[in-house]
Image (cartoon, rainbow, N blue to C red):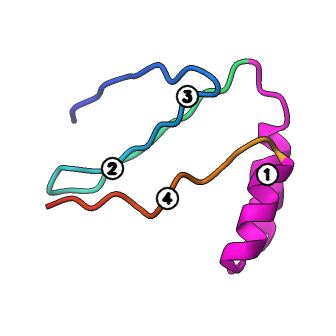
Amino acid sequence: MLSDSIFGPRKIPHAFANVSEGDARLMITCQPAGTMEDFFNEASKNPNTTHEESQILHRKHGLEVMGPPLKVD
């Protein structure tokens, strides 16, 4: 299994995509955590939210979705 790490500074837009053939895992560490635990708890209660509901939840916790998912060829 390959592994790598990256530092994503606060307030800098960033994205990720699995560019390998197989499955991938993503582990995120937030320091300081702020309201991230609350965000994940709320998001896990209803995985079938609409795009608008998801945007509201993200904004509530200081997050912003930056465009559509990345396309990997």
Seen at 81% across and 63% down, the residue is: 56
- Dot 4 or dot 2: first in sequence order is 2
The residue at which mark 1 appears reads as 59
Number of the label disc, if any, that sits on residue 12: 3
Residue segment shown in magenta: 32-60
Q: Which quadrant holds the N terminus?
A: top left
Distance from disc 3 to disc 4, alpha carbons, whole Å, reads 14 Å
Q: Amino acid at mark 3?
A: Ile
Number of the label disc, if any, that sits on residue 38: none
Q: Amino acid at mark 4?
A: Gly
**Residue 57 versus residue 38: which sits nearer the camera?**
57
Number of the label disc, if any, that sits on residue 67: 4
Distance from disc 2 to disc 1, alpha carbons, whole Å, reads 22 Å
Seen at 17% across and 50% down, the residue is: 20
- Dot 4 or dot 1: first in sequence order is 1
Specify whether 56 is left or right of 15: right
Residues marked 3 and 4 touching at CB (< 8 Å):
no
Q: Secondary structure at mark 1?
A: helix
Distance from disc 1 to disc 3, alpha carbons, whole Å, reads 15 Å
Distance from disc 4 to disc 1, alpha carbons, whole Å, reads 14 Å
Specify whether 2 is left or right of 25: left
Circle 3: is it few (<14), some (14-19), or many (20+) Cα within 10 Å? Answer: few
Q: Is residue 45 above or below residue 18?
A: below
Q: Position of residue 49 (x, y in %)?
A: 72, 77
User: Do we see residue 47 in this rendering?
Assistant: no
User: Do we see residue 23 in this rendering?
Assistant: yes
